[in-house]
Image (spheres, helix red, strand yellow):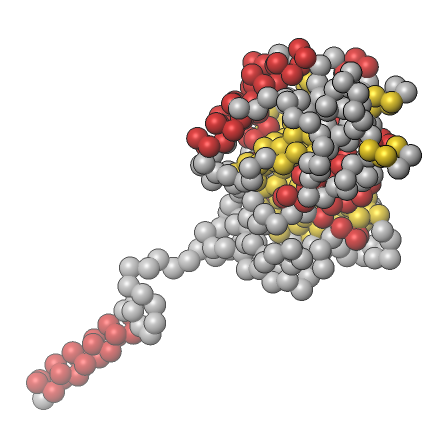
């Protein structure tokens, strides 16, 4: 009887050990149980120009599941206090309103994303400003991490794309060192999203006069520098970069824009920037600030949740590049599916509030319904 009882005890213990084992029925040994994800599963819109990419929330060790059948408005949000980034805000401290109706935040993350950057450089600056910009450009690399990528481009009345995106910092540094502004004629070098350039009475605006600079032409006091076309073209270069990256343009310019030289208007350029979730960070150079010529740079920065900085000297510009990339990398990301608003409207106002005293919020204050991917 004792022998049978002991056998029963051993049998019972063996069964308990089997069922208590971490390898039963399918889990791998030594694999810790996943932490509970506080955010609900995010449903993101599909990008029409490529497969959807995951966004990884900071608060969770599991990746957000991407499903493509819900339309979301995605808002990058920068929060500062006394000019310094505020990194410790939580989801419940944010409120989002669309057309004055509060929305449920479907997704939130403070994850530091890798960057996809188009460095867009004005190719027609005053000689003093040109020298300062050229000397500062190599400092762009100092603000980048090994996971970031950059595409260097220039513009005057045409868009001049560089050698493509690269995350090889040595190659990028070499390219930046070799940049000589206003060194190439602007003939037949239109970027991927522009037309063949401005015309006057059906003829090319470039002209053959030896007294006309190869970059920008002034006709009766009007500049033919096409800043809007350049930003539009830069947006097209960024549209296929993944959702797991921050997409941004560093726009280095004196702000002069020949409105009649552009094929693309500010409005349709902005729509594409919002559609592809591209933020513009403008660096105003020269003395145009005093002439109130930086308004275009300010508008692009404000309307895309970017920022604008001003610098007149090379060392000041060098410091700004690192500040720009740090700020872009460390934005909060909020996303919501619109509820309770008139979906027939093309234009919607957006407001983000934070439940913390003394902070300044930078984000988009509008979006166009046609610019939200479906």
Q: Quadrant of residue 314?
A: top right
Left or right of 316 on screen, residue 209: right
Q: Quadrant of residue 317?
A: top right
Residue 77 can be seen, yes or no: no
Q: Residue at x 67, y 57 (%)?
A: 48
Q: Is residue 61 visible?
A: yes
Front in this rendered view, residue 347 or 8? 347
> How far across and down, in percent of the image, does residue 350 sit?
77, 43
The x, y position of residue 345, in whole percent, is: 87, 53
Up-down relation of residue 276 to residue 322 (above or below) = below
Location of residue 77 in the rendering, given as x and y in whole percent from the top left corner: 65, 38
Say above or below: 246 vs 15: above
Q: Residue at x 19, y 81 (%)?
A: 11
Question: In the rendering, at what x and y percent does residue 26 appear?
Answer: 34, 72
Taking the spot 74% from the left edge, 53% from the top edge, the residue there is 372
Q: Residue at x 72, y 23 (%)?
A: 214
Q: Nearer the viewer, residue 77 or 9?
A: 77
Residue 128 relative to residue 366: left or right = left
Query: With 247 as the anchor, is 26 left or right in this view?
Result: left
């Amino acid at each position: 009887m004792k022998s049978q009882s002991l056998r029963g005890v051993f049998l019972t213990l063996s069964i308990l050990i089997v069922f208590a084992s971490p390898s039963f029925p399918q889990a791998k040994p030594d694999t810790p149980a996943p932490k509970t994800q506080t955010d609900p599963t995010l449903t993101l819109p599909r990008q029409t120009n490529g497969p959807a990419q995951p966004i990884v929330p900071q608060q969770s060790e599991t990746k957000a599941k991407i499903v493509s059948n819900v339309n979301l408005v995605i808002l990058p949000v920068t929060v500062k206090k006394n000019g310094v980034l505020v990194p410790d805000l939580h989801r419940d401290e944010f409120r989002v309103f669309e057309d004055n109706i509060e929305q449920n935040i479907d997704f939130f993350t403070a994850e530091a994303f890798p960057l996809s950057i188009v460095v867009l450089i004005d190719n027609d600056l005053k000689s003093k400003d040109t020298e300062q910009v050229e000397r500062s450009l190599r400092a762009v690399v100092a603000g980048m991490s090994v996971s970031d990528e950059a595409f260097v481009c220039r513009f005057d009345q045409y868009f001049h794309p560089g050698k493509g995106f690269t995350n090889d910092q040595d190659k990028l540094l070499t390219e930046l060192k070799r940049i000589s502004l206003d060194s190439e004629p602007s003939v037949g070098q239109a970027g991927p999203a522009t037309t063949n350039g401005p015309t006057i009475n059906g003829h090319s605006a470039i002209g053959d006069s030896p007294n006309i600079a190869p970059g920008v032409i002034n006709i009766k006091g009007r500049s033919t520098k096409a800043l809007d076309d350049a930003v539009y073209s830069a947006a097209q270069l960024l549209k296929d970069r993944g959702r797991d990256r921050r997409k941004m343009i560093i726009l280095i310019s004196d702000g002069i824009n020949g409105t009649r030289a552009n094929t693309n208007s500010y409005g349709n350029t902005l729509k594409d920037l919002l559609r592809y979730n591209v933020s513009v960070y403008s660096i105003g150079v020269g003395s145009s600030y005093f002439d109130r010529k930086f308004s275009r740079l300010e508008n692009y920065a404000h309307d895309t949740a970017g920022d604008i900085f001003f610098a007149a000297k090379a060392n000041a510009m060098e410091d700004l590049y690192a500040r720009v990339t740090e700020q872009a990398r460390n934005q909060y990301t909020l996303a919501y599916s619109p509820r309770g608003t008139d979906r027939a409207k093309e234009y919607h106002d957006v407001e983000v509030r934070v439940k913390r005293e003394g902070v300044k919020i930078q984000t988009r204050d509008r979006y166009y319904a046609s610019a939200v991917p479906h």
